Amino acid sequence: MKLKVCGMKYNPEEVAALQPHYLGFIFWEPSSRFFSGEIPSLPKEIKKIGVFVDATIADVTAIIEKYNLDGVQLHGHESTEYCLKLRPVRFSKPDRSIEIIKVFSIKDEFDFSLLTPFEAVCDYFLFDTKGKLPGGNGYAFNWSVLEDYPSTKPYFLSGGIGLENREQISAFLKRPESKYCHAIDVNSSFESKPGLKKINELKEFMKVVSG
């Protein structure tokens, strides 16, 4: 199971030293984890994901180029047409396109037919907790909803996941609905303040994910 640590701001190098598979950088200005600095040199095995909320295509492509991103995570109301416009983006990575992660928010139920139009235009889905903010709300949704997951598209499991969820994660990864779970996404539950990650707790959590 892969791990994505999102909301990078103050200590990305320390987090990168743990070798997660993905690091997420938020480019939505209202976020307390909004990133505007310089991304340090990271191991090439770690994919840099830019998180956006209803940004213009021009802004997204400019940030992809500036930070040499590997993928984008779309947290807003982006349409299939929007995703198609990002599909050909290559920039400094001429050998492959940018990976597209489309986010869907869940609480106690979800209409999975909403996924169908996006099947052909994104690489992954990400299921997060429905709350006041587009992400980083700090609590988990009801994972049993995923028992009805109808797709074979790999997905990220997100939403308030922390060390206190160790047993739940271990149990989830043994259930059929985790078959297409590509990665666990963590953020606010591993912080001492927004954007500053707790390294020792992340290290402990990685043991759970790596199983």
Image (tube, rainbow, N blue to C red):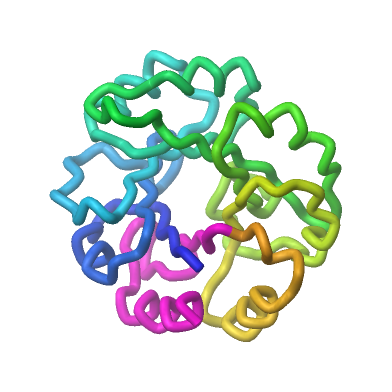
The quarter of the displayed image where residue 175 is located: bottom right
Q: Position of residue 82 (x, y in %)?
A: 56, 18
Q: Position of residue 99 (x, y in %)?
A: 45, 36
In the image, residue 44 sits, relative to residue 66, either above or below, namely below
User: Residue 86 versus residue 202: which sits nearer the camera?
Assistant: 86
In the image, residue 32 sits, relative to residue 138, either above or below, namely above
The residue depicted at 35 percent of the width and 56 percent of the height is 195
What stretch of residues is rendered in magenta?
182-211
The residue depicted at 30 percent of the width and 30 percent of the height is 95
User: Residue 1 versus residue 135: which sits nearer the camera?
Assistant: 1
User: Residue 143 versus residue 28: which sits nearer the camera?
Assistant: 143
The residue depicted at 62 percent of the width and 81 percent of the height is 170
In the image, residue 63 sits, relative to residue 38, either above or below, namely above
- Label total for image: 0
Residue 106: say if magenta: no
In the image, residue 193 sits, relative to residue 92, either above or below, namely below
The residue depicted at 75 percent of the width and 47 percent of the height is 151
Residue 203: say if magenta: yes
Is residue 141 left or right of 163 when viewed as pictured?
right
Is residue 76 left or right of 178 when viewed as pictured?
left
Q: Position of residue 51 (x, y in %)?
A: 44, 39
Is residue 122 left or right of 104 when viewed as pictured?
left
Q: Position of residue 49 (x, y in %)?
A: 38, 43
The quarter of the displayed image where residue 18 is located: bottom left
Viewer can see residue 158: no
